[in-house]
Image (tube, rainbow, N blue to C red):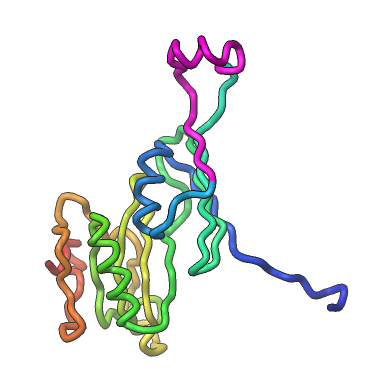
Amino acid sequence: MSKTEVTTLKPHISLNVQNVEDSVNFYRKLFGIEPMKFIKGNTTVHSIVRDNLGLESEEPRFGYAKFDVQNPPLNFVLNEVSYSQGGTLSHLGIQVESTEDVLKIRERWLAEGLLTVDEMKVDCCYALQNKTWARDPDGNEWEVFVVLENTEARNTCTCGEKVEHQELSTSGCCTETDKTVSINRETQKSCC
């Protein structure tokens, strides 16, 4: 290996979240694994904990979780911090090889109780894609997608802001044979 080459292990994503326990419950379902590290914050210390740990229990610590995702390789971290609204993050995604893979992941998410929205044969971000979306407790949206073909933009692309919790059903709406169903962009309602 030359001095200019670097061995990259995996990407790292760190998200600020309002409630680390709610977020860990979501990401357990999204990734299908347990976190390798999960520390609950101690903004309020119960008297039993104080009696057992003494002054050590008074030291503030923030909520934290780390997922060591193997497929796709990802070092994924949640930091429990106070904030009033999100930053500049648009959305997060996982690209897969086929529509069958999109549907398999969607089915796993549905089985875990996550709400999903499908977009099939949608021309977005300079590509014709099949995808499904889920939203975490802090409003971060995740897509699993396959690129069917590269395209030129025909109109504006509105990635993110797909999942409206109150408008979704937990049953899948798009099947392998019904690949043209998509979200209604005007009402943002799912195709279910």
Q: Is residue 24 above or below residue 74?
A: above
Q: Position of residue 139 (x, y in %)?
A: 34, 49
97 relative position to 132: left or right: right
- Quadrant where the N terminus lies? bottom right
Quick check: is 111 in the magenta stretch? no
Q: Position of residue 167 (x, y in %)?
A: 14, 55
Q: Position of residue 128 (x, y in %)?
A: 34, 84
Which residue is located at x 52 percent, y 39 percent? 64
Span colored in magenta = 37-57
Which residue is located at x 57 percent, y 57 percent? 75
Which residue is located at x 33 percent, y 73 percent? 156
Which residue is located at x 26 percent, y 83 percent? 121
- Please identify the quarter of the rendering in which residue 83 is found: top left
184 relative position to 89: left or right: left
Comparing 154 with 92, the one in front is 92
Q: Position of residue 116 (x, y in %)?
A: 24, 62
Quick check: is 49 in the magenta stretch? yes
